[in-house]
Amino acid sequence: MKIILKALGVVSMLAAWVYAGNQLHFFGDAPVRVIHSQYITDLSDDRNLVGASHNVFVGKVVRHVSAEDIWALPANQYEVEVLKNIKWSLTGNVTVEEEGGYRDGFLYVIDDDSAVVDKSGKHSANFLSDGKVYVFATRYNEQANRYTVISHQKWKKQINNLSGNDPRINELKKAYINESPLDVDVKAGRDRNSFKKLDKNQKDAIQAP
Amino acid sequence: MLLAAFAVWFSSVQAANYVQWISSVDAGEIRWWGSTKYTIPLLNSIATWNARGKVNIAPDTATTLEDVTLSDVNLSNVIWNWRWTYSAYFSSPIEFNTYYLDLVSASRKQNTITHEFWHALGLAHSVTNNIMYTTQTSLTALWTQDIADYTYIYGK
């Protein structure tokens, strides 16, 4: 009996060690898995940021609607009310999705975006919140008719000025006029809503003060 | 007091080197499984890392456990050309986004794959003109910060 108990004790300790060792750190009760990636363009330049986007707009998160994966990794979808367009013209409510979320007891965060790292190096989540207003930069998910937030902190900025006079909005409007679309989008015919494709009236409207 | 001293030392080390303290290295090697259409840049990238001589990157076999699993995806609605999701005791998936990689040059493909294995080796994004800069470039050779960070973790 003693041998069985000792064996059970050792197995339990090993199981706990394996589980604990699989985690880098914890957010609340959930262990965190950080997703690392490399971007196709330099997102520190707004012209590249806007050029890589299909839509840029100000929107208010109405509610969280679902948690469907984007290719085998967690993501979350939200109903968003479009308040103001910067790149192209969306109207009404649309479905915006962002990569990252919970699955099987783990919190998945995107390094550089949904992960916020404190001074000790601990990651925590920075997902969209119901009722808050953001400037969104998105790419269109053709299969699901959704707008996928570009996974970089610079592309999802919460704003508090509902009148739309946040300086970030003007910065992005200027960048749209001088945007640099992705070469792969242009070659594939997916440079949606690019400034070059607008007619004269549309361009004038955007360039008007 | 010892703890404070350690924290100060740790912070200074982090500032000088770009490391992430997690990797797919297991007993001095990374065993990869799965497949990708980018075979030539993959093999070239592996050769770059294996030339450093400290970590062996090799295909998985019947007697080894894979550390990373390679696959291709085609997603036009994301902005990344690959992603690596860390897991300490299970195989970490590495996915290459063919929507972007199909149309870039061979050197950019190799830059991407070399960069990705660099993360799997435990290094973080660093500065411009290095493989580990956050954005894809056409660099295929390791540069000063890349080598400094690798040496910091694995020695000379």
Image (cartoon, helix red, strand yellow):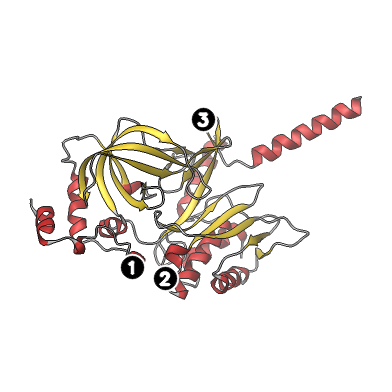
Where, quadrant-wise, is the N terminus of chain A in this rendering?
Answer: top right
- Residue B126 lies in what quarter of the image? bottom left
Mark closer to the chain start, 3 or 1: 3
Mark 1 to mark 2: distance in Å? 8 Å
Of the numbered discs in the image, which one, if any, rests on residue A28?
3
Q: Position of residue B27 (x, y in %)?
A: 71, 56
Amino acid type at circle 3 is Gly
Amino acid type at circle 2 is Leu
- Residue A66 lies in what quarter of the image? top left
Q: Which residue is mark 1?
A: A183
The foreground one among A206 and A31 is A206
The foreground one among A101 and A66 is A66
Q: Residues within 10 Å of mark 2 (few under 14, many from 20)?
A: some
Q: Which residue is mark 2?
A: B103
Q: Are marks 2 and 3 on the same chain?
A: no
Q: Are marks 1 and 2 in contact (CB under 8 Å)?
A: yes
Mark 2 to mark 3: distance in Å? 42 Å
